[in-house]
Image (tube, rainbow, N blue to C red):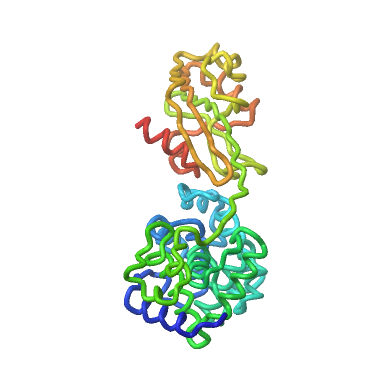
Amino acid sequence: MNNKYFASTLLEWYSLHKRDLPWRNTKDPYIIWLSEIILQQTRVAQGLPYFEKFIQNYPKVEDLAVAPADEVMRLWQGLGYYSRARNLHYCAKEVVSIYGGRFPDSYHGLLRLRGVGSYTAAAIASFAFDQAVAVVDGNVFRVLARYFGISTDIASSKGKMEFEAIANQNISKDHPAEYNQAIMEFGSLQCTPKNPDCTHCPLKANCFAFKEGMVEQLPVKINKLKVKTRYFNYLYIRCGLNVIVKQRGAGDIWQGLYDFPLHESKRELISNIEDLDMFSNIESITDKVKFNPQSTFKHILTHQRIFANFVEFTINEKSQEQLREWVKQRGFEMVDMETLENLPKPRLLLRFLNEEK
């Protein structure tokens, strides 16, 4: 299914329409790797400020490798998919300790790195080392499916293999890096998921989906994702300029981030403060309780839908020692507001704290 017209047309389009993005003006594998990890499942407009912050704080892979984990997570805060940040940090250490600060210069070598899958390895191999390995991301799936009329489910292992094979058959052997950038940019700007500009598309004369009226039907993705609904009842406990936090552990969302003491209910958020397990243990030292059960925060993740409310407790500073004992018994931490500001937190907590200001 090789089509030289397809590749040459994309390259010509790209020369006229490409965006000037910082990671496109370098062959440095560190900068390319960093941009690819940040942009996974993230729009360029959202990811660009994070990329700039990371480059400013960690201009070389060695700088990222020695950075404190909390600092890395704080810089990542708000971008979501926090396992990417943990893998990013681990991979930087790996590159420094095992490879002497130099990224492997082959597709298969790059695949050995933590958090580097087939797409990221292909991107680094082509952009940094000019290897003819095709990238396949959501944009590429869409362009290939529409142009060649491929109806295989892109979420299936069979679909992944089929699209990777077609992508590699059509990559420009003379300009692999530019071709990979071109097809992704084309999918991002021209062949968009909804309302693509088919009228002015340079590929429309030979595009299967355009000719058959199937633009909206391709690519095919059979969604097998089950979304779990969870109910978080947070205790926002303040004592003077201090607040109670806890660091989330492994085995759940937001690993390594900080949030507040939490009561998770099974079917719905609590409507009565007495239903909070921890309330009876703290009510004796509470001066003021603020609870609005109608003030619900909704937070959507890939696999989970979270509803949350916040019960605010104000503790008199005279009761601080009793509070410290309560905190110690439960493995929580008491921090001041400045420290809270610098701790890495889920976006859900950022929304709540911003509303509190």
> Of 215 and 63, which appears nearest the observer?
215
> Of 297 and 141, which appears nearest the observer?
141
Could you tell me residue 268's position as x and y percent? Answer: 56, 24
> Of 318 and 349, which appears nearest the observer?
349
Could you tell me residue 13's position as x and y percent? Answer: 36, 77
Q: Can you say which quadrant of the picture contains the C terminus?
A: top left
- Toward the bottom, the furthest residue is 174
> Of 102 and 8, which appears nearest the observer?
8
Q: Residue at x 43, y 75 (%)?
A: 182
Q: Quadrant of residue 115?
A: bottom right
Q: Quadrant of residue 351?
A: top left
Q: Can you say which quadrant of the picture contains the N terminus?
A: bottom right
- Toward the front, the furthest residue is 212
Could you tell me residue 153's position as x and y percent? Answer: 60, 60
Residue 218 vertical placement versus 261 (above, below): below
Q: Residue at x 61, y 59 (%)?
A: 90
Could you tell me residue 21's position as x and y percent? Answer: 37, 69
Q: Residue at x 50, y 56 (%)?
A: 41
Q: Give the number of marks.
A: 0
Left or right: residue 209 compared with residue 160: left
Q: Residue at x 52, y 61 (%)?
A: 219
Residue 223 vertical placement versus 311 (above, below): below
Can residue 226 be seen?
yes
Can residue 317 be seen?
no
